[in-house]
Image (cartoon, grey):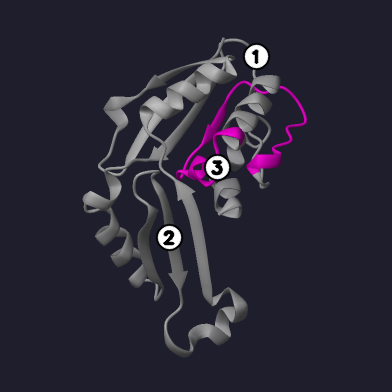
Amino acid sequence: MLRAAQEKLAPWSDRVELLNQDMRNLRLSEACDGAICLSFSLCYLTEDSEFVTVIDRLANVLPRGSPFLFDMLNARAPDSDWIAEESARWANRGIDWKFHWLDREKLKYCIQYRLPGDNKAIMKEQAKEVHVGRAYTSRELHDLFDIQGSFVLEDLPSLRTPSLDYYIARRN
């Protein structure tokens, strides 16, 4: 995915830095004008403390007024057509995709990718991949950004989809 993003952003490669690292250990080498984190990647931060740590690290490199744009899988996702759409999209690629709640009340979920049948030889031990995440509510996100204190968080309802909510946090 990073390679595809690099190709798409090639005309702006002198102004855009793409990073591939565990965001819980986020290391940014220098100040930047803004940050974007999509594909509900922040959902992998399942503990409040992890989330606040990442926000702290962003605050250290974003100047005042800089935006941080991100999306978040929402609690409505499993009740929307999203699960069926994602299942069909992955099935078209020959991959079995399943979603289930680990703890619906805490909005913790599991997404599992698996190659069916004897295709395991293609991916060997990676034939089964499990992702555990948390779908934060808007209230939880606002509380976490308030605790951290360096950003003002704004919901972006005009971008909302049945499964994703979008937010922009501005460095204050």
Q: Is residue 76 above or below residue 125?
A: above
Task: Give the residue type at disc 1.
Answer: Pro
For the point 69% across and 37% down, the residue is 26
Q: Is residue 170 above or below residue 56?
A: above
Of residues 53 and 170, the one nearer the viewer is 53
Q: Is residue 61 above or below residue 111?
A: above
Viewer-nearest residue: 87 or 31: 87
First in sequence: mark 1 or mark 2?
Answer: 1
The reply to whether discs 2 and 3 touch (Cβ–Cβ < 8 Å) is no
Q: Is residue 17 magenta?
A: no
- Marks 1 and 2: CB-CB under 8 Å? no
Boundaries of the magenta span: 23-49
Give the vertical position of 150 relative to 159 (above or below). Answer: above
Mark 3, residue position: 45
Q: What is the spatial separation of the Cα atoms under label 2 and label 3, in whole angstroms? A: 15 Å
Relative image position of residue 88 (x, y in whole percent)? 29, 66
Q: Which residue lies under the disc numbered 2? A: 111
- What residue is drawn where x is 48% and y is 28%? 69
Q: Earlier in the sequence, mark 2 or mark 3?
A: 3
- For residue 51, side relative to residue 89 (left or right): right
- Tag on residue 63? 1
Please report the residue visible at 36 percent of the width from the left and 23 percent of the height from the top: 155
Locate the C terminus and report the quarter of the image it occupies.
top right
Front: mark 1 or 3: 3
* Residue type pointed to by label 2: Ile
> In the figure, residue 18 lies in which quadrant?
top right
Q: Residues within 10 Å of mark 1 (few under 14, many from 20)?
A: some
Q: Secondary structure at mark 3?
A: loop
How far across and how far down the image is residue 21, in percent?
68, 46
